[in-house]
Amino acid sequence: MDEIRTIAVVGAGLVGQGWAIVFARAGLDVAIYDARDNAEVVIRPQIERAIADLGAGGLCDDPTALLSRIRFTETLADAVANSDYVQESAFERIDVKREVSRAIDAALPGHAFVGSSTSGFPGSDFYADCVHRARMMVVHPVNPPHLIPLVEIVPTPWTAPEMAMRARALMEDVGQSAVSLSREVPGFVLNRLQGALLDEAFALFAEGYATAEDIDRTVRDGLGLRWAFMGPFETIDLNAPNGLADYAERLGPMYAGFAAQRQADRGWTADAVQRADAERRNILPPSGLLARRSWRDEMLMRMVKAKKDLPS
Amino acid sequence: MDEIRTIAVVGAGLVGQGWAIVFARAGLDVAIYDARDNAEVVIRPQIERAIADLGAGGLCDDPTALLSRIRFTETLADAVANSDYVQESAFERIDVKREVSRAIDAALPGHAFVGSSTSGFPGSDFYADCVHRARMMVVHPVNPPHLIPLVEIVPTPWTAPEMAMRARALMEDVGQSAVSLSREVPGFVLNRLQGALLDEAFALFAEGYATAEDIDRTVRDGLGLRWAFMGPFETIDLNAPNGLADYAERLGPMYAGFAAQRQADRGWTADAVQRADAERRNILPPSGLLARRSWRDEMLMRMVKAKKDLPS
């Protein structure tokens, strides 16, 4: 990673702030640009709080040093023109993405490359008109990036393959867990997998087979325990005597039977959504959402730490 | 739990052994019957090893006391006739299930009830002719039951509702995490959810969007980190400002779009299975499967312990 020293973080909502921490934690210098008035005044304390939480969770040795690597710029051009890599996390609206990408494009040094945190748009929707589009792609994190290491790298049709590989190398160098898609697809991988499971969860709930809480329990005390450290392919690879192909032979037909029963266009019916929401509100009143998110982030740190303590 | 003191474990392969540990760990007396010759000679050392691993993982305070609560019987009738609850984990073949269920039925005391560990058959396929079928149901664990707490309780059309509730109470009393289905459905909840995700994973892999390893990474370093302690409904409930209904409104259409693209009958094509298996074998040769399963069980214990240390 000898050529990447300075990162421009464009857009510093929660995702951008998380990215700033990821890069600074890895020893890189970070220049944040955010379009809001008084951006630094608003954002710096939020970053400091997040770093303090990391420290309390045993996941950050030197908060002061980390913070010292983060600075704010007055203009987007200032942050981008002095960077080796740009992580864009602007507002998730297509006109904003296009405008910000053009501004990044105009200031981009010849050697630098760009990743967008977008979850909802293919890069080809907003990089098409950029001069440097061969060095631009989607680099999609999971919120919050400094707690969940997964990053999906999704090239546009114009992204140079070596740029996508450089993005992957950078992500791995800064401690993230990178996944490389060969080409664009809506939802990339993570949200498509999540959607597949959610669709089945909503269908089972809608058809009255179990409560939303019991369906949640099935995952958090069952499937999710395994999936916290093994993906679905490794899970089944270990669940039949002779590995994945053996598992597919023994149980493939069973799963095909479930699939045959699944109807297309089941969707999340309005009734199922309303009832699932009501069940959640019964378990957790709206006033409890904030504290529960803090608990979630604390648990994420513990999961990450538990995995680190036993390397694979 | 004042009336449940003694458990009959019928069938003591890995699943039955795990059950014996679950019940003995909770302070109950366990009588194991297994049809194999020299059953105790074969099985007792396996149980001792599993308990030793639990102790090493900090999940069992007194292995000696636990073992002292486990005995073996010479006949099925002996184990069942003196029990308050029977956990059946016989060979997963319908004729075996029917035969064993009839034998249990013939010896069952008036007050006792029965759960089957079956994963592939509805209880109605083998309990139909039993006199005590109102007190019989599926009580389906995840392998291994002493490490993964999830249990699915699936009544047949003849199961008395209060018996299903007693089974749930028993499961919770012995430290498992119970899910109650309202009625039978192939795959119950867990395998249907797993199948939904696996189908999408195989499709993305088959269509060349990512390697099997990167798809696995998406789960173990992304989705699975959250799902280790939050189910899918809670996850999305916390991922929009105003909870689940808010999330469904913002992102429901996006997921519906993915679903519309999913084709029915995609299945796990022979080519995709062979290529995924080849990828797995490249990462982990067949000779490494055994050690990797040990690593998996060690990690499961760490996940369980990490969750225990921060109660929700």
Image: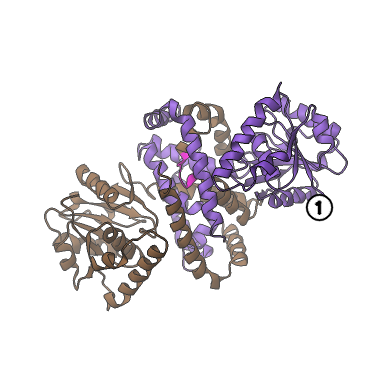
Chain colours: A brown, B purple
Counting from the top left corner in percent of width and height, residue B203 is at 43, 38
Task: Based on the picture, tell me whether residue A75 belongs to the magenta stretch.
Answer: no
The residue nearer to you, when weighing A207 against A248, is: A248
Whether residue B291 sits left or right of residue A35 in the image: it is right
Amino acid type, residue under disc 1 in the picture: Asp
Q: Chain of mark 1?
A: B
Q: Is residue B97 above or below residue A185?
A: above
Residue A213 visible in the shown view: yes
The magenta-colored residue range is A227-232
Counting from the top left corner in percent of width and height, residue B292 is at 46, 34
In the rendered image, which quarter is residue A125 located in? bottom left
- Give the residue displayed 27% in from the left and 75% down from the top: A40
Whether residue A15 sits left or right of residue B91 in the image: it is left
The single residue placed furthest to the top in the displayed view is B37
Q: Is residue B229 above or below residue A243?
A: below
Structural crowding at the residue carrying mark 1, measured as other residues with C-alpha within 10 Å and reported as few (<14), some (14–19) or many (≥20): few
Q: Is residue B118 above or below residue A108?
A: above
- Give the residue displayed 17% in from the left and 60% down from the top: A83
Task: Based on the picture, tell me whether residue A229 belongs to the magenta stretch.
Answer: yes
Specify the principal SS of the magenta part. Answer: loop
- Give the residue displayed 48% in from the left and 57% down from the top: B252
Q: Is residue A294 above or below residue B224?
A: below
Disc 1 is placed on an element classified as loop
Judging by the rendered image, the residue that carries numbered circle 1 is B2
